[in-house]
């Protein structure tokens, strides 16, 4: 197996540890294939946020309530998710890192539930800025049991569109990633931020 390309990737990761932080968001609707792209990042040792904070927090609230969250539950849930994103952002001090969703995702979810952005979200968006945002085009496949709930009870395409609009409203110009294999998408993303692609 040729290792030169993987050596270049490893060298880039190591060299970045002596540089200021660079933060790249990977996002999209509930059926965008994000989990598979994150798994590819992990497989190749590329620094990333492995889990999506909102999912685990959602499950915790659902277990406590004994049901899926309703509009009246959103404020408490959203505040906890925002706190998790801020902690993740502040904990990253050097080098590049990929984020499993970002703070502006909350704009889309809040709009979906008919809620206006909170003062806390607006402030966080001004203070904590990402370098690049990648939006995965939908695959229409479900990655998580909670995604199936959204497919049955909500409009997944609308959630995707609202998330995208949220990033525009937050002052970003997202880069859209085609609906292809996770390997293709990872290479596409790395090329856009000038990080060596892994050898497979």
Image (cartoon, rainbow, N blue to C red):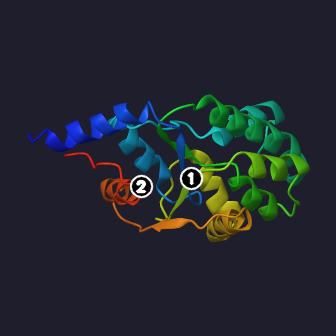
- Specify the farthest residue to the left: 1
32 shown above or below 22: below
Tag 2 residue: 193
Q: Quadrant of the N terminus?
A: top left
Q: Residue at x 28, y 35 (%)?
A: 11
Q: Camera-side residue: 21 or 150?
A: 21
User: What is the secondary structure assignment of the residue under circle 2?
Assistant: loop
Give me the disc on residue 119. none
| Residue at 49%, 68% in the rendered image | 176
For label 1, the crowd category at 10 Å Cα-Cα, with few meaning under 14, some 14 to 19 and many 20 or more, is: few
Query: Is residue 32 something one can see in this rendering?
Result: yes
Residue found at x 78% / y 35%: 61
For disc 1, the marked residue is 131
Q: Is residue 182 left or right of residue 136?
A: left
Mark 1 and mark 2 in contact? Answer it, CB < 8 Å: yes
Q: Is residue 101 left or right of residue 153?
A: left
Mark 2 Cα-neighbour bin, 10 Å: few <14, some 14–19, many ≥20: few
- Indicate which disc, 1 or 2, sits on the residue closer to the N terminus: 1
Question: Which quadrant of the structure image shows residue 99?
Answer: top right
């Amino acid at each position: 197996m040729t290792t030169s390309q993987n050596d270049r990737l490893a060298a880039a990761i190591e060299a970045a540890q002596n540089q200021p932080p660079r933060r790249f968001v990977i996002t999209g609707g509930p059926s965008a294939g994000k989990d598979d792209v994150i798994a590819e990042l992990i497989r190749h040792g590329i620094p990333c946020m492995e889990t999506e904070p909102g999912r685990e927090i959602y499950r915790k609230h659902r277990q406590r309530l004994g049901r899926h969250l309703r509009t009246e539950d959103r404020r408490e849930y959203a505040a906890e998710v925002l706190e998790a994103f801020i902690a993740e952002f502040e904990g990253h001090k050097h080098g590049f890192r990929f984020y499993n969703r970002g703070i502006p995702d909350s704009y889309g979810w809040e709009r979906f539930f008919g809620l206006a952005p909170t003062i806390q979200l607006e402030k966080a968006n001004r203070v904590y800025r990402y370098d690049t945002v990648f939006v995965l085009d939908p695959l229409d496949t479900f990655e998580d049991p909670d995604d199936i709930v959204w497919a049955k009870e909500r409009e997944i395409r609308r959630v995707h569109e609202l998330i995208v609009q949220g990033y525009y409203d937050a002052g970003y110009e997202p880069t859209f990633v085609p609906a292809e294999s996770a390997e293709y998408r990872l290479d596409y993303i790395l090329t856009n931020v000038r990080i060596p692609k892994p050898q497979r």
